[in-house]
Image: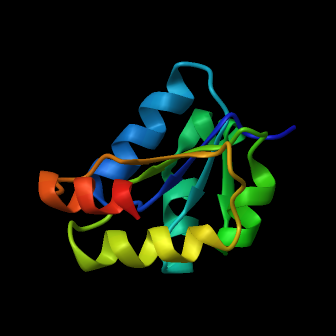
Amino acid sequence: EKAEIGLIGLGTMGSNLALNIAEKGHRIAVFNRTAARTDAFVENAGALRDMVVPCYSLEELAAAIRPPRPIIIMVLAGKPVDEQIAALRGVLSANDIVVDAGNANFRDTMRRFSE
């Protein structure tokens, strides 16, 4: 079964958001740049483990989510967000949705939208 939503970045905020989404009954695909953090997140998900789809590449993440794919980015503001968006461009389709839910400067958001 495909996930309804994807999340990139399993730091404190991303992990808690992913668990909250899973707790509300939504299957979520998760990706972190370090596989060890993804593994630890799934291991600690407890009863919600069945609602979590661990992914180890952006390609795997995209394939795990039913289209149109909503993906939440929860990484450090600035260059890390730009890098994730650039990498996602190669794996997502025109109708997919990318949400930067981190602490971004609004000017960066406006610039990304115009790109």
Q: Is residue 74 visible from the viewing direction of this image?
A: no
Q: Is residue 94 visible from the viewing direction of this image?
A: yes
* Residue displayed at 58% across by 68% down: 88
Asked whether 113 or 77 is in front, the reply is: 113
Quarter the N terminus occupies: top right
**x and y percent of residue 7 in the render?**
51, 51
Q: Is residue 67 rendered to the left or right of residue 98?
A: right
Task: Indicate whether 7 appears above or below 38.
Answer: above
**x and y percent of residue 5 in the render?**
61, 39
Task: Indicate whether 22 appears above or below 77.
Answer: above
* Residue displayed at 14% across by 58% down: 107
**x and y percent of residue 20 in the render?**
43, 30
**x and y percent of residue 112 in the render?**
34, 61
Task: Indicate whether 62 appears above or below 24.
Answer: below
* Residue displayed at 72% across by 38% down: 68
Quarter the C terminus occupies: bottom left
* Residue displayed at 34% across by 69% down: 81
Q: Is residue 99 rendered to the left or right of residue 108?
A: right
Farthest residue, direction right: 1
Task: Indicate whether 12 appears above or below 52.
Answer: below
